[in-house]
Image (spheres, grey):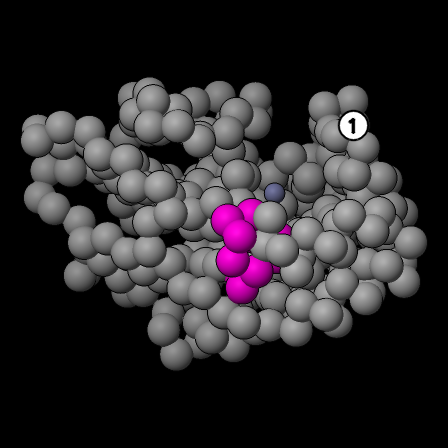
Amino acid sequence: MRYAILSDIHGNVEALRAVLHDCAARADAVVCLGDTVGYGADPQACVELVAERARASVGGNHEYAVAGRLGLEWFNRYARAAAEWTRERLDEDHRAYLGALPLITEIGDATLVHASPAQPEEWDYLVTAEDGFAAFASFDTRWCFVGHSHVPGAWSLGSSGPEHHPGCASLQSEHGRRYIVNVGSVGQPRDRDPRAAYAVWDVEAGRLEIQRVAYDVDAARRKIVQAGLPRFLADRLAAGA
Ligand code: ZN
């Protein structure tokens, strides 16, 4: 079984379509770690594609904001402007669907969560080595897949000690070790690589690869500007930051 693990699509349907096309030959099923909406110009198309294609999904802070389950005072001005814009473009059914997504779920021996498995509703970022190591006590599965920071990375814990791999591109699991992996962002990468990011997890082989997929960044940028969303949200797609 091979899962394509997508996170932080952020209303970028150009990036999402490119990733779904790329993963068709690499994975048997798709799962989604949240923030499917917010920032990009195509929230509805992204919600519908994910609802149709993903075998499991969890909600991110942007889903919860759009569904009215999280106050916008937690957001910076760009995120708030995008959340208000997105809320108006989704109908009642879509908002209800997003608000009903669980914060945390499991597939096989993996936990799926948008932010940290420790108190997912606090939306803490796993960034430093210590952030990741401290989170292992909060889940029981061997693997935990997260998003939220839009930067790929991996943390591992086992008898030979803790390991942190910022920017991790691939990993082969070892007996007796557990793993937290940030799969990066489909629709708004922030690791200075503008290509869409997602992960392929091969369960039997115990292998994980971060894939990068080129997509039509200019089309996604143009739509953001035409929609009247903050220009910064368009420009950062080109920089991948
Ligand atoms: Zn996000």
- Mark 1, Cα crowd under 10 Å, few <14 / some 14-19 / many 20+, is some
Query: Helix, strand, or loop for circle 1?
Result: helix
Identify the image quadrant of residue 211.
bottom left
Can residue 189 be found in the magenta stretch?
yes
Q: Where residue 11 sits in the image (x, y, percent)?
A: 71, 56
Classify mark 1 as within 8 Å of ligand 1 or not, answering yes or no: no
Q: Disc 1 marks which amino acid?
A: Leu
Front residue (pair 202, 93): 202
- Report whether residue 57 is seen: no
Asked if residue 80 is positioned above or below residue 25 in the image, the reply reads above
Which residue bears the numbered disc 1?
72
Q: Relative to 15, is 153 on the left or the right?
A: left
Identify the image quadrant of residue 155.
top left
Q: Relative to 107, is 73 on the left or the right?
A: right
Q: In which quarter of the image is ligand 1?
A: top right
Asked if residue 22 is positioned above or below residue 136 in the image, the reply reads below
Give the main secondary structure of the magenta stretch.
Answer: loop
Residue sitting at x 75%, y 38% = 79
Front residue (pair 160, 2): 160
Span highlighted in magenta in the image: 187-196
Residue sitting at x 24%, y 53% = 171
- Report whether residue 29 is seen: yes
Residue sitting at x 53%, y 45% = 150
Q: Relative to 150, is 159 on the left or the right?
A: left
Q: Where residue 128 sits in the image (x, y, percent)?
A: 39, 28
Asked if residue 86 is positioned above or below residue 51 in the image, the reply reads above
Where, quadrant-wise, is the N terminus in this rendering? bottom left
Residue sitting at x 82%, y 65% = 223
Q: Where residue 94 sits in the image (x, y, percent)?
A: 76, 51
Q: Where residue 73 sits in the image (x, y, percent)?
A: 78, 22
